[in-house]
Amino acid sequence: MPADRQTESNRLAPALLILAILVVAVLDATTSPELHISAFLGIAPLYAALRCSFRVTLLVAAVFVVCLVPVDLFTVPDWAPASRVVSIFGVVLVAVFSLVLCRTRLQREALHARTRMVADAVQRAMLRELPLSAGAVEAYGFYVSAQEGARVGGDIYEAIETPHGLRLMIGDVQGKGMPAIGAGLEVLASFREAAQHVDSLEEVADRMEQALARYNTRSVEQGADERFVTALLMEVRDPAGLPQGRVLSCGHIPYYLVRDGKVYERREGEGGLPLGLRTLSGEPRHSVRVHPEPDDWLVLCTDGVTEARGKDGAFYPLAERLAGWTDLEPAELAQTLRADLESFTDGELKDDATALVVRRSPAAAQLSMARAAAA
């Protein structure tokens, strides 16, 4: 087990360090005084300071001092007293420095752990953890921030059950990583509120547009950049077991429909400008009616997936990959897609990447098909 191996390694390292100090000190005490190899042992407490606990580092440093001071005092007869003092002072200095280094490392690790806790709390407040469940729908997937060390970034998603049916959204903020969080949070909060209270996707998109406009105004006043957000909104109403859907795209990339083992790229609802750019066109946004079937799957993603590049500069062939994975369950498909994307890019994503695999729960799909057959 990885944890067991790590624990075993943590116990073995100080034992090996102490053994190395003892062996080298004995060799120095029993061999020719011209061969003073213990001078290189300062690496032992320094290594302990970088890898071990403070108590272990203290033990290694103490053994280092206890073994090397007699060696410096008695094994080099030609040294002047001043040279012996300097050598012993160097030994003590290395030991003290290793303790200070260990304490500083542990403090930084504790700070990093607290920072990660805060980041996790922010992520949970901003984005619900996958998989999502909303009414009769399940959404599996992944979210990867392109900014090293960041747990959240510029991609957003949500699926909620509302009085107006199930509503689903995926979005991509201009930019990536931490600087895009503010705009993403503003748009996401607006969607969650509007989806519960307004009747149409067009009105939901308008509310999101207004929220982003207010955010951009504040950003300009504070000397920050304005941002735009691409978003794909979906709605499914199922009053009698026969789903009725609508799709509205605010400049977002197409989604993929998996039906009867085949993959279709769907562009319904395209044509609208991204959120934040409404002033460039006076044309209103319009949603498009779609006709989902009970056993349909949807794959929604951001352009961090479709525009990911391999070593040869080619874009990630998402549709081609999906066509070979239609026999997988949604959770397995999401895991396979993520692993394949990381392998394709050699782990070097240039943008935040999010993918959602959405389907009706098996029980809901069976009930819908039974109702459709009865009708």
Image (spheres, grey):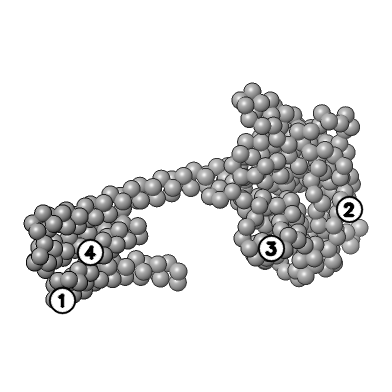
Query: Considering the numbered disc 2 on the image, is that residue within a helix, a strand or a loop?
Result: loop
Question: Which amino acid type is shown beneath numbered disc 3?
Answer: Lys
User: Are the residues tagged 4 and 2 within 8 Å (C-beta)?
Assistant: no
Instruction: Give whichever of discs 4 and 2 has the lower sequence position.
Output: 4
Which of discs 2 and 1 lies nearer the camera? The answer is 1
Instruction: Give whichever of discs 3 and 1 has the lower sequence position.
Output: 1
Instruction: Give whichever of discs 2 and 1 has the lower sequence position.
Output: 1
Instruction: Give whichever of discs 2 and 3 has the lower sequence position.
Output: 2
Which residue matches tag 2?
291
Residues at marks 4 and 3, CA–CA distance in whole angstroms: 47 Å
Query: Considering the numbered disc 3 on the image, is that residue within a helix, a strand or a loop?
Result: loop
Q: Which mark is residue 311?
A: 3
Question: Which amino acid type is shown beneath numbered disc 1?
Answer: Thr
Q: Position of residue 374 (x, y in %)?
A: 89, 61
Residue at x 73% of width, y 60% of height: 313
Which residue matches tag 4?
39
